[in-house]
Amino acid sequence: MTVNHWVAGSSPAGGAGLLFCVLISFNPQNLLPKITNLLDISLKISRIFSLAICFFLLSSGFPLSLFGSQTIEGDKSDTKEAFHESEQIIFITAYAKETKGNLYFYSLEDGEWKPVLENIPVRLGKNGIIQGEVKREGDGHTPSGIFPVQRILGKEKRKIQSLEYIEISKNSHWTDVSTSKHYNQLIKHKEKGAVSLWDSGIYELFIVIEHNTSPPIPGYGSMIFLHPWNEDKPTSGCVGVPKDILDVLVSTLDGRKNPYIILRLLD
């Protein structure tokens, strides 16, 4: 079962208080009425797929630990509040220890959630997805969590909709050295151990997954991006997608819609 279209009837703003709920291998004929009655969500569905992705209203009991954005420790209430208003969500899922996952991208248009991309194969870190708070530098894991989309970087001039776009130059570097004062930061000069963004094709265009970025805590993971990937092997911890898919994401994302990335480990 796959959700092709839905409307949140009880939320005038459409995006407030919405979160993805992933349901695997259930009979849609038996399950859908229960979901609809419980959540008061109108769904139009296809009957032939085993993966169900639905929205449910975010309650006051929502676990803050899922908000892996920016800070590893401390108050995440601002992120939670902002997520209530999200009108674009990139949803990436995988099972434990799997290095392959799937990407879904939904956008709220005229009060209705509509799919932009669905069931797109992605590559993950060589050790799969792990909870964001236990992610460590060099462990080969992709951190789970809920991350605001704030920055896009690329080597070409691009028109981006109300999001920060940084054009990469020959001096653009990002450091994953835990002892550096610039750990997990973009810098515009060479530094010992820092990675050149200019010299690698995977940094031709990428979306920053804001894990451990503001402020970065040394050793808790760095350089987590959504970037091009055409190799048949895992990444070092980023999310790798085909370049044409990344182009669709970048051209459709709109900062006015408060977009978020959800990285979710499936049970």
Image (cartoon, helix red, strand yellow):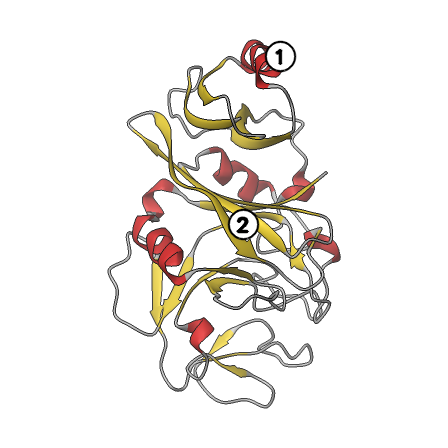
> Where does label 2 land, which residue?
147
Q: Classify 149 as above or below 49.
A: below
x, y percent for residue 38: 59, 12
**For the view shown, which residue lies furthest in the front direction?**
48
Q: Classify 13 as above or below 195.
A: above
Query: Which of the two discs, 1 and 2, sits closer to the camera?
Result: 1
Marks 1/2: CA distance? 33 Å
Which residue is more in the foreground, 118 or 253?
118
At 35% from the left edge and 25% from the top edge, which residue is drawn? Answer: 112
Residue 141 occupies which quadrant of the picture? bottom right
x, y percent for residue 62: 65, 31
- Residue 72 is left or right of residue 86, and the answer is right
At 73% from the left edge and 49% from the top edge, which residue is drawn? Answer: 96
* Secondary structure type for disc 1: helix
- Identity of the amino acid at label 1? Asn
Q: Earlier in the sequence, mark 1 or mark 2?
A: 1
Question: Alpha-carbon neighbours of circle 2 within 10 Å: few (<14), some, or many (≥20)?
Answer: many
The tally of labels here is 2
At 28% from the left edge and 57% from the top edge, which residue is drawn? Answer: 160
Q: Classify 126 as above or below 91.
A: below
x, y percent for residue 142: 64, 58
**Viewport quadrant of the C terminus:** top right
> Where does label 1 land, which residue?
30
